[in-house]
Image: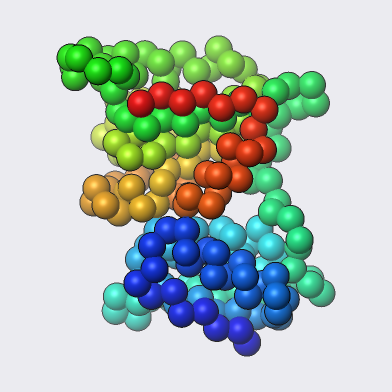
């Protein structure tokens, strides 16, 4: 079994360490030790995308993520999380970096952002991924004014992800109400693979 000690490492280092071992050694099983919940979800999702069956256990402040290969060798490419976009549609990634739109009046900015998120359904099947970073992750929490709308997009096939480091820094990880956690590596790859990236801050 391969082992990766990623304690004390910040996003996306735990995933990068795991990826390095998987690509160099192609182990039948791998254990990654991390010290935060965001890293558990990020590493688990990465290993799952490479064909590993994943489980995790908590030991005090530490977490052990165990991946056991289901095929003969790891998959070389990351599997898409969802296949909503039909042939001929552009894949649009919307990157939301705040829970308000623009600068000036904060109350107005929050109202504008709520209105924007509620109107995203006008993109139809082109809406490929919704990624929330920094203050934008508040929109994916249980008390979000657009929680039901975002759940609706996810149910329709849109990939919904929140920055795990951001959620942890803001103390919101336990309050996540929709979607999964992501890391900077996945965000970079998603922006590279999207046909169009729309950003709001």
| Left or right: 55 in relation to 74 | left
Instruction: Name the spot of residue 43 as percent of width and height, x first.
Output: 52, 64
Give me the residue at 29% from left, 79% from top. 60
Is residue 152 positioned above or below 10 on the image? Answer: above
Using the rendered image of the protein, determine whether residue 65 is visible from the camera's viewpoint.
yes
Give me the residue at 59% from left, 41% from top. 190
Give me the residue at 79% from left, 72% from top. 73
Task: Give 40 or 17, whichever is nearer the viewer.
Answer: 17
> Which quadrant of the rendered structure holds the N terminus?
bottom right
Using the rendered image of the protein, determine whether residue 152 is visible from the camera's viewpoint.
no
| Left or right: 124 in relation to 59 | right
Instruction: Name the spot of residue 87 as percent of width and height, x first.
Output: 80, 26
Give me the residue at 70% from left, 75% from top. 24
| Left or right: 199 in relation to 99 | right
Q: Residue furthest bottom?
A: 1
> Which quadrant of the rendered structure holds the C terminus?
top left
Is residue 194 positioned above or below 166 on the image? Answer: above
């Amino acid at each position: 079994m391969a082992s990766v000690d990623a304690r004390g490492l910040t996003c996306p280092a735990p995933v990068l360490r795991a990826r390095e071992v998987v690509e160099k050694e192609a182990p039948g099983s791998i254990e990654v030790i991390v010290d935060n919940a965001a890293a558990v979800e990020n590493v688990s999702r990465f290993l799952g995308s490479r064909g590993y069956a994943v489980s995790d256990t908590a030991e005090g402040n530490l977490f052990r993520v165990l991946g056991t290969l289901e095929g003969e060798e790891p998959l070389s490419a990351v599997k898409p999380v969802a296949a909503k976009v039909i042939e001929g549609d552009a894949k649009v990634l919307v990157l939301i970096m705040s829970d308000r739109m623009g600068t000036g009046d904060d109350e107005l900015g929050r109202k504008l952002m709520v209105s924007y998120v509620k109107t995203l359904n006008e993109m139809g099947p082109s809406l490929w991924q919704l990624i929330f970073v920094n203050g934008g992750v508040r929109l994916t929490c249980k008390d979000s004014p657009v929680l039901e709308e975002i759940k609706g997009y996810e149910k329709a096939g849109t990939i919904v992800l929140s920055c795990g480091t951001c959620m942890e820094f803001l103390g919101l990880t336990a309050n996540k109400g929709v979607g999964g956690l992501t890391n900077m590596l996945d965000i970079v790859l998603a922006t590279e693979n999207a046909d169009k990236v729309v950003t709001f801050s």
